[in-house]
Amino acid sequence: MIEVLHTLSRLAMVSFLLRLLLHLAIAVSFPPLLLGIIGKVKAFFGGRVGPPVLQPYRDLLRLFRKGFVFSRTTTWVFRAGPVVGLITVALAMVLMPLGSHRAPLAFGGDVLVFAGLLGLGRFFTVAAALDTGSSFEGMGAAREATFSALAEPGLFLGLMVLVRHATGASLDLMLSTEGTARAWEATPGALVMVAVSFFALLLVENSRIPVDDPATHLELTMIHEVMVLDHSGPAFGLIQYGAALKLFVFASLVVNVAFPVTTGNPEADWVLFLGAVVALAMGVGVLESTMARLRLLHVPRLLVASSILSVFGIILGS
Amino acid sequence: MGFASTLLVIVLLLNFFMLGASRVRAVINGSAMQGVVLGLLAVSVHAHLDLEIVLIALVAGLVKGLLIPRMLMKAMRGGAIRREVEPLVGFMPSLLLCAVTTGGALVFSSTLPLAPQHAGSLLVPTSLATVLAGFLLLITRRKAITQVVGYLVLENGIYVMGLMLLEAMPFLVEVGVLLDLFVAIFVMGIIINHINREFSSLDTSRLTALREE
Amino acid sequence: MIAGVLGVVLCVVVLVVSGLVALGLTRKPQVAGAVAASGVVLGALLGLWPTVRVLAGGASSEASASWSLPGGTLAVGLDPLTAFFLLPMLVLGAVAAVYGREYLLLFADTRRLGFPFFGFNLLIASMVMVVLARNAVLFLVAWETMAIAAALLVSFEHDRPEALRAGWVYLVVAHLGAMCLFVLFLLFKASAGSFDFAAFAQTPPVGSAAVAVAVLALVGFGSKAGFVPLHVWLPEAHAAAPSHVSAILSGVLLKVGFYGLLRVFQLLGTRADWWGPALVALGISSALVAIVVALYQRDFKRALAYSSIENVGVIAVGLGVSFWAGSRGHPRVSALALAGALMHVWNHAVMKGGMFLVAGSVLHGTGTRDLEQLGGLSRRMPVTAVAMTVGVLALSALPPLNGFVSEWLLYLSLLRLGADGAGPLPLLLVGMLALVAALAALAFVRLYGVVLLGQPRSDVARHAHESSRWMTVPMLVLAGLCVAMAVFPGFVLAALDGVRAQVGGPALFPADQLSLGRLGAFNLALWAVVLLGGRLFLGLVVRRPVTEDDTWGCGYPEPTARMQYGARSFSELASEQVLPAMLGPRVTRVKPVGLFPGAARFSADDRDPLTRRWYEPAFARVAGWLASLAWVQRGVLTAYLTYVFAAVLAALLWVSLRSGGAP
Amino acid sequence: MLLALILVTPALAGLAFALPSGKDRAWLLPLGGALNLFLALAAIFFDAAPAAEGWLALDPLGKLFLGFGAVLFALLSIYAPAYLHLRAERPNRVMVACLLVFPGITNAVLLSHHLGLMWVALEASTLATAPMIYFNRNARSLEAVWKYLLIGSVGIALALLGSLFLAYAELHENLVASLRLEDLERIAPSLSRPWLRTAFVLTFIGYGTKMGLAPMHTWKPDAYGEAPGLVGALLAGSMTSCAFLAVLRFFHLCVAAGEAAFARELMVGFGLLSMGVAAAFMVKQHDYKRLLAYSSVEHMGILVLGMGLGGNATFGSLLHLLNNGMTKGVLFLSAANIHRAYATKSVEETRGALRLVPWSASLFLLGFIAITGSPPFGPFVSEFTILEVAVREGRYVVTALFLTFLLIIFVGMSSTVLSVVQGKPPAHLERPHRQESFLLLAPIVIFLACSLGLGLYLPPPLEALLREAAGVGVP
């Protein structure tokens, strides 16, 4: 009897490990695809063929094979920027449930750690930019730091709405399919607000149009891209990959809130979830193709608007 | 009592005289006269004269009527001034003020109960009115000497009050008071002398260097 | 070692005596410094043992002796609340004393050092005495000694006008606060009949007197803690003081204000409903205003000082939420918020103390606090750079450092409040706190970048030198404490248990304790991962070809250090374009116009907006009113005599009126 | 022995007048100070018997004031020779003589149990101090002494009128008109009320002029500002205390007569007015000696305010007298040292005294901290005691005004004092050009030690004396 139990538990362990591996594999491998999809959609709208969807993977591989160029001005901070930037996003990813799939790591209050990790990553990215001593990178750093500071209240206010119907204060529980579904039933209005607010957050945090134009070539109008100008080779690869990962994390956040659907079948749920993420990416692509970048000084209004949406959400949700 | 009352009225009239006089000499003379009248008063208000009272009357008359006025006259000649030109408050207004304060003194003293032996006496109102007249002289005049006279008149008023208490006050204290008065005016005289030398004038309105800006 | 409160009293004695000896040795600064600093270290060691024992759950102790002073008794006590504030005093005091000896000796050629050494010891001693005192008169004596010692230390470099002014402003605010405390304790006395705290607790004031006491405590102690709008002394003082003193001011002295608040609240016994919301309102407004202003400061230490106000605000919010939630029946929330607030007291002491030491080291190495003169220091001051990295991350409330842990507790409490459905208003607090934290991160990444990174902006920065070991080791000790407290929050929480109970807050729920432990583990893991990742990346760098070149200037061939983004340009977007102009710097621009433009000019005034907009005009107006009274004393003797005359008439009139007609 | 207290130092003054050498003459001062202190202490400890048919007697109040005055004078007399040595260019015959006469006269005020004698002595003290104020012999000091003399004489004349009214208050009730304190206190309950009240008002204003209560304070900034610091300290400490005692004597009669209530109100009113007026003029004060004069006005206000509040505040008020006197000693003497180093009293030109005269400047700074009522100095304890009564009696308006004025005064005084003490000295004075000698500092240090000592520890015998004098037991 006991052996059976042992075997069962061992089986459970193995299946758990397998599921974890699958989860991580998807989380690690899928993100660059989103960049490819967005690029493709924009190309479509621009009437071009555009690079293949898998181009981001090739870019990354190419970058990782290159050597480094470091500015003489820079110190260890410049080298730490990409590393810490990637590590923090990766850990944030670990805290994030993907659809109905539980997050690999969860504990009470980890939602705050999630925000903290993103902040830490941003800190080092910005510091690395300042380490170059370039006026352009300094400018980008200032913009990035300012805008993401203003975006922070929106994130927290949205979380406050979600925690109302969650069973605990971990990201895993707050974004669980059941919890979000319950919230949709109780206060659909609030959830719409939060979903929109989080989508705006996604655009800001990932430097998408209308906040920033990742494809522009005029440094003076850039935010994120100008900040990483001096990075090269594998370091730049880390940054690019980190950016993809971050997009994926935020896409998951939005999808978790906006699309809390589960079939009960894990495999089907993966398809459902990734499909939703891809759809979101396409949506971003469409948006980028149809909208112009906002004037720099109008960006804060967008951020404040997103916070205000969450405030409405709180009021509706309570 | 009739005599005493007459003297008191004279004291009051002298107050008006001093406030209305423009010549410094006249003011000093007025105060001298007041001093003499006060000496007489001391003798007249008291039914039983004893040595102490006579002595004090004598000393007071001497100091207030002779010694101090002479000192002031000397200072005046030193300062070569004759008139109180442009007093801070004109002569007519100061006379009016004096009338008002005298009336006020009468009213106020009517609220103070008197001992039977002083019933009907004008001593208290005269005293208060003289004190106030002294104050008026101090406040409305520019010349140092006139101000000293004002102080003297003020002291005269107090002396009138003291007359009611001559029996009560020890002789020593009375003499001490008079001595203090004399020394005070003596010191003031010295200072007037210095003022005269330092500022070549006895006009105290120049003494305004010490002030808040 | 002497256990119990007498051990701490002995510590005070050692501090004062060593300080006096140092004062006597004014002509031999080397010796004086050694005596003073070793006095502090010795005193701290003497005091630590009883303190730690009480924090570890040992019994409280009291002692009392009669004192021939009206109302005074020499009553002292050591309970968890005292020990809680005592610990950072002793630790930071000892560390700062060691640092300060070296720091001050740099001035040995130009200044007399006897007083600064003595004053520092006196400051620590009086602070210790403040938390020990159990008698209002003794408390006030210690309290004002503390203020005066601090003010005189602040104006140490009094030939600089800003230091002189800082000392003056500090004295004035401290005096205002002390007056509130006078009345506060007198109200206690009026109901208790004695100045002893023990009697206060027996028969505390009730009704409107209790309200008055609480309000006076909020003003009196709040001015010490630095609540807006009574914070104006704080940035000036912290910037002007020698850096080890700034560390003490910010790390401990501000917290003494909280000690006072908590002690008075404890003595008042019953907790009024409005305390919580009042603290929250004060706290959040302080935090928001301060961090917005911190963002554009040009002076390194002033920026840190404003951040101190922000942190004080966060602590107040924590206490307020705890009180509020406790009275509304949310014990779990209350416990979390209280734990967060208390832990933040310690965390902030360590991290801000460390940061001020860093600022001192930078000042020492370059001779300037002006951010626009700094830059690129991490190459020339590597150890300072490491300490600053830790401090900046901790102050930005980022993992894996201790500042994050306490703010984590606070946010978690608010999340729980949201989960409990406590109405929208407290929940909006989360948004504001998030903004505060995000702006703090912005402010600190700016400091970090402008001081350490990029190219030196001036010759002094180009020729900066690292400080000696006497200064770097204290910084590293505090940085190490920051890390340790982040990785082992459970220990910290356990040490707070006694004071938690004394303040009357509920214990942290087991589930939350568990989460806190996991957070500690996560922090440890994060350290490990980041260090490992860094190691791997460096391995990669070694294996790949590396080229060194100039920074890419976007095609511009000759970038200079002056072209870098500086302190002002970095914060320009936030503080001049986005955030409320009322709190922003006053900017004067003369743009070149026309065909033959005249001289263009630009200046930004980063003084405190409240000082600039409220206090200076108000003071000027009152001074104007008073000056217009000068005619009273215009030197005219006859006028003076008229006053006497008028006084006589008025008094006589009053007497006759008062006694109904006849006088 | 009491007679000796009055006569010994004036006798020395006679000697001083006779001595030809100014330098030797100055050394008579410490001798006089020591003798006076010795006699005073002996009288206090051995409870000297009444003298001159009971006109002179030593009650607890007298003991307190006598001891205080003697200590103050002794310390000032140590300072005096060194100071006069600095001012060797000025003849000091009159100065020394007057200084030596002064304690005799003030002792007479303190010891006399006859209100007439007390008046005579107080008037004499005015006259004796006038030459001291005129020590500098320039136009400014002349103006100061003129105002001092005239306002002071008018005030004291009012006090005489008041004394006579009091005598009449007895006479009116068919009592023996006597101005002896013992008689008066015995028959106080049966005095004629209207006369008594008017008498109190007149004497309060009269002696209040001498104390320097607003609005009769106007002579004070001029006299204190122009007199040598030594004289300022003597006036602010000793002379004002004599006038205060005179006020107290009359006040006690009112209390004994059951007329305390109106007297208290009057005192509270004038006390607050004095503090307010002082506060107004201490903001942006350009002359640091005038600043000290206004500070003296403020503290006279506190003294009568404390008396007016009554109860334990009486004790506080008497304690404050000591504290204020000692602290004023620190302030006036250190200000005098600073004045000598800079040769100007203007705050604008006096900067960075800590660099130029570090000791005096430090003492000046500490004196300022003490006088503004900061613990751990004495004035804090006494002000706190007074405030306590105000709060306990629920007189919140008084409390609020008291604290507001104190705060304004602190703001004004601190900005002036700090800018004198701190900062950079003017360029032409960069080097310390005159050594601060021991004798110029030691008395200041002792004054400060007294002020600090009274803030940290009130010796039980002194406390007992204070309580006895205040007529209050241990609360």
Image (spheres, rainbow, N blue to C red):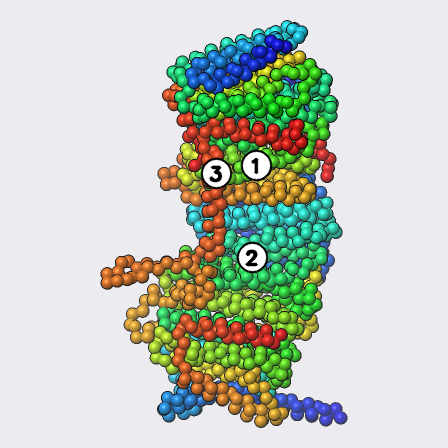
The residue at the point 28 percent across, 62 percent down is: C593
What amino acid type is highlighted by mark number 1? Leu
Does residue C486 show up? no
**Residue D254 relative to residue C553: left or right:** right
**Residue A178 relative to residue A117: left or right:** right
Q: Which mark is residue D273?
A: 1
Please tell me if label 3 and label 1 are on a single chain. Answer: no
Q: Label 3: which residue?
A: C629
Please tell me if label 2 and label 3 are on a single chain. Answer: yes
Q: Label 2: which residue?
A: C227
Q: CA distance from mark 2 to mark 1?
A: 34 Å
Q: CA distance from mark 2 to mark 3?
A: 34 Å
Name the element at disc 3.
helix
The residue at the point 61 percent across, 24 percent down is: B107
Q: Give the chain of mark 2.
A: C
What amino acid type is highlighted by mark number 2? Phe
Q: Give the chain of mark 1.
A: D
**Which one is in front, D277 or C549?**
D277
**Which one is in front, B196 or D205?**
D205
Residue B50: quadrant of the picture: top right
Q: Which of label 2 and label 1 is nearer to you? A: 1
At which x and y percent is residue C8?
65, 52
